[in-house]
Image: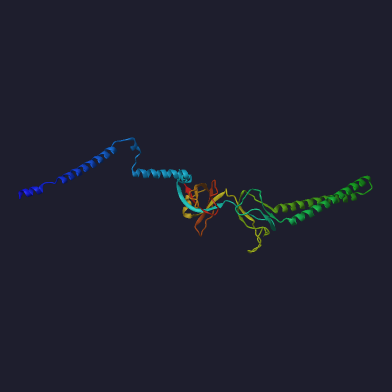
Amino acid sequence: MNEDKIQKLKIDKTQKKRSGRFVGFIFAVAIVITGIVIYYAIPRESDSIRINLKGLKTLASKTNSVAMSITNPAITSINSATNGYESVLTVSGYIIARERIELSPRFLGLVKWIGVKKGDYVTNGQVIVLLDDSEYVAKLKEAEARLESAKITLEKAQIDYDRTHRLVLAGAEIQKFEDDARLQLAAAKAAVKEVEKQIELIKTYLDWTIIRSPINGVVLEKLVDANELVTPQSFGGTRGPSTAIVALADLNDLQIEIDLNEADLAKVYLNQKCKISPEAYPDKVYDGYVAEIAPEANRQKGTLQVKVQVLKPDKFLIPELSAKVDFLK
């Protein structure tokens, strides 16, 4: 019995070999891990470029910010727009041309030709509309014919006066004839001057048929077409002739029109510096100043109109679009 138990307690040789292999595998793995740890524990130059995940994110964020400021310098200008100043009030208004000019004729006439359309750039003195001038051309020819006749009458009166004057000096005629001849000569001279002035007036009317731009600007509206009747004043009603031909404005002279709440009036004063940004292009910022404060408020709205002059406007500022204004302290 005892021998049987002892035999059962003996370890098989194959199991001994298997256990030895397992221990050797564990020992080898431990050596490899220890080697890796020692490798990364030794300092080297390449460690200087290693950064943790948080540092990498911070660096990427800064890099993106720098890249955005380089590719879009307008954003940088926004961030530094109020540098040295404090914004005390921000309101919205509308972009307007400081002066809007509507050209009207000086007399009732028919549009013969119009050479501009909406959005065209025009220069000071440029011909943009021609009115029908046939009536005044005919009057000019008639007046020129009268002038020729008046000059002939003047020449005859001059001859008569000279002859009468010689006869009076010779005693062949009485003084009365010389006086009559002198008066006829004076009347002939006056008639010539009268016709000459009529010709000047007709030429003025002819010049008025040529309508020129009084400014360098842009055509905001084209209000008539060729063959339409225009007049300097309305006859009343909605079916009368047009009283304006085109509307012009200088887009290099723009303002922001604001209805300012009376509670904010104490924060605004004349010549106050402002920063302007159109709502359509919020990354664009322009300098400006308070150019006008209305002398009278709107009782119904409880507002006062303020106009901010834009310095150095460009094509991004379009009249009648909205813009945000920061009033600076």
Give the image quarter of residue 35. Answer: top left
| Residue 113 shows in this picture | yes
Farthest residue, direction left: 1
* Quarter occupied by residue 69: top left
Residue 320 in picture, x, y percent from top left: 54, 54
Closer-to-camera residue (109/52): 52
Residue drawn at x 16%, y 46% is 14
Residue 260 rendering spot, x and y as whole percentages: 49, 54
How far from the left and from the top, in percent, is residue 67? 44, 44
Residue appearing at x 34%, y 37% in the figure: 46
Residue ID at (78%, 51%): 196
- Coloring scheme of the render? rainbow
Residue 214, position as x, y percentages in the image: 64, 50
Residue shown at 68%/55% (left/top)? 113
Residue 47 lies, with reference to residue 173, above or below; the image says above
Report the side of 247 relative to 34 (left or right): right
48, 293: nearer the viewer: 48
**Residue 191 appears left or right of 125:** right
Question: Is residue 155 or residue 79 the one in the foreground?
Answer: 79
Res 183 seen here: no
Q: Residue 104 falls in which quadrant of the image?
A: bottom right
Up/down of 243 relative to 58, above or below: below
Q: How many marks?
A: 0
